[in-house]
Image (cartoon, helix red, strand yellow):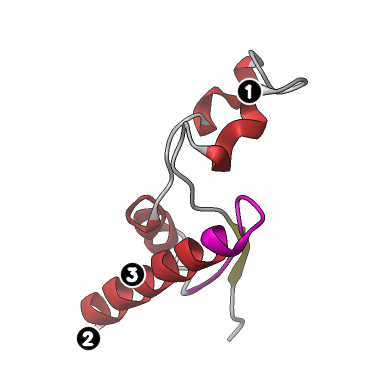
Amino acid sequence: MSVVVDTHQHFWTYGTYQTSWMEAPPYAGDPIFLPVRRSFQPADLKPELNAAAIKHTIAVEAADGKAENEALLARIEALEARLSSEGK
């Protein structure tokens, strides 16, 4: 059996430094980015993973820096805890 891994997942809070790139050219005002102009958290990812039967994902930082890395690790731990408790 093959293992399927979502190899590129971001979590962010829209309107913070994490998404400031969306407000700069060439992204600012581009309607193609409308679907991602919102916050994405582990709770948003879980149904998508379940629907696609994906058990593994790799989270990638949304910005550079220590605070971002710590926030990312906390979100990953929250997602792992939810998936573990619901998978039992």
Q: Quadrant of residue 5?
A: bottom right
- The residue indicated by pointer 3 is 78
Whether residue 53 is situated above or below residue 18 in the rendered picture: below
- Would residue 29 appear left or right of 49 to someone viewing this image? right
The x, y position of residue 70, in whole percent, is 49, 67
Kindly report which numbered mark, 2 or 3, lies closer to the viewer in this rendering: 3
The N terminus - image quarter: bottom right
Q: Give the magenta part as a residue range.
A: 56-68
- The residue indicated by pointer 1 is 23
Residues tagged 2 and 3 counted as in contact (Cβ below 8 A): no
Residues tagged 2 and 1 counted as in contact (Cβ below 8 A): no
Q: Secondary structure at mark 2?
A: loop
Instruction: Name the amino acid type tagged 1.
Output: Glu
Q: Is residue 64 magenta?
A: yes
- Would residue 17 appear left or right of 88 to someone viewing this image? right
Nearer to the camera, 52 or 57: 57
Whether residue 81 is situated above or below residue 72 in the rendered picture: below
